[in-house]
Structure formats: C-alpha cells, structure tokens
Image: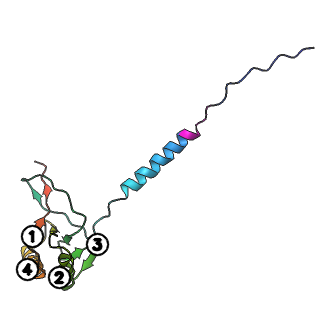
Amino acid sequence: MRLPEAPRREPAENIIPLINIVFLLLIFFMLAGALTRPDVLDVRPPETQAGDPAELPDEGVILLAADGRLAFAGRELEPRALEREVADWLADGPERRLTLKADADVAADRLLDLLDLLRDAGADHLMMLTNPSER
C-alpha cells in the first residue's frame, strides 16, 4: 500500500528584518524627540508682527520670568550671581552675544533693571526673542 505524499508547504516569510527596522525607527524617534531640553523657567515671549524668525542660540540665553526670576546656562540665579556668570561668560570670547527671552507679562521696571545689570556685566549687544504673531 502506498501512502499519498504530504503536500509541500511554502517556506514561511521571515519578518525578523522588518521587526528590526521598526525597532530602530522607534529608537531613532525617541532620541530625536529628546534632544531639546525644556527651559528652566516657563517663559512666554511677547508677540511681534515684524521680522523673520531667528534661530535660538544654544548658549548665552537669559530667561526672565513674569515674576522676576532669572536663569542663565540652565540654572536659576539671583541677580548678582547672574551678573558674575554673564561677565565670566562674556570674558571667554569677545564675539559672544547674549539673547534675552523675557516673558510678555514682565513688568517694565524689572526689564530695565535687568538691562542695567547686563550693561554692568559688560554686555554690549543683546538680542531679545519674540514670537511671530498669527496675523
């Protein structure tokens, strides 16, 4: 008696390379999304209608919150400590420029006090960041 031959099966598709690619893409997007650090202080700059958006520099950014708190180089500082830090930072390179990211609700007298402090620290050039308006 002769038995019939078993039907031949096609080899299963190998999906392991596809799984590897999906995991590599997942890791890439997790790392790419974590590259920017949030600011030390929650600052919402004022809106402007003029000018093109500029690139935010990586260093030399001073944050001024609405309640008057200050931060520089990723640390919250008191005004006199900020003056020393800025003076030291500017002494490292004459071409260094400071950027001020002040909250839209900050009082004008606090802003003027900060500008006087920065002038005393040796800051000659200061760029103030704003958000482009939606209009």
Residue at the limit of the structure toward the top, as seen here: 1
> Which image quarter holds the N terminus?
top right
Q: For marks 3 and 4, give the CA distance.
A: 22 Å
The residue identified by callout 1 is: 125
Residue 33 lies in the magenta stretch: no
Label 3 with label 2: CB-CB less than 8 Å: no
What colouring method underlies this structural image?
A: rainbow
Pointer 1 or 3: first along the chain: 3
Residue at the limit of the structure toward the bottom, as seen here: 80
Image height check: is 5 above or below 90? Answer: above
Which residue is pictured at 50% across the width and 43% down the height? 21
The residue identified by callout 4 is: 116
Give, as a single range, the part of the protein colored magenta: 13-17
Pointer 3 or 4: first along the chain: 3
User: Which circle marks residue 18 in the picture?
Assistant: none
Q: For marks 1 and 2, give the CA distance.
A: 15 Å
Q: For marks 2 and 4, give the CA distance.
A: 10 Å
- The answer to whether residue 34 is left or right of residue 109 is right
Pointer 1 or 2: first along the chain: 2
Pointer 3 or 2: first along the chain: 3
Label 1 with label 3: CB-CB less than 8 Å: no
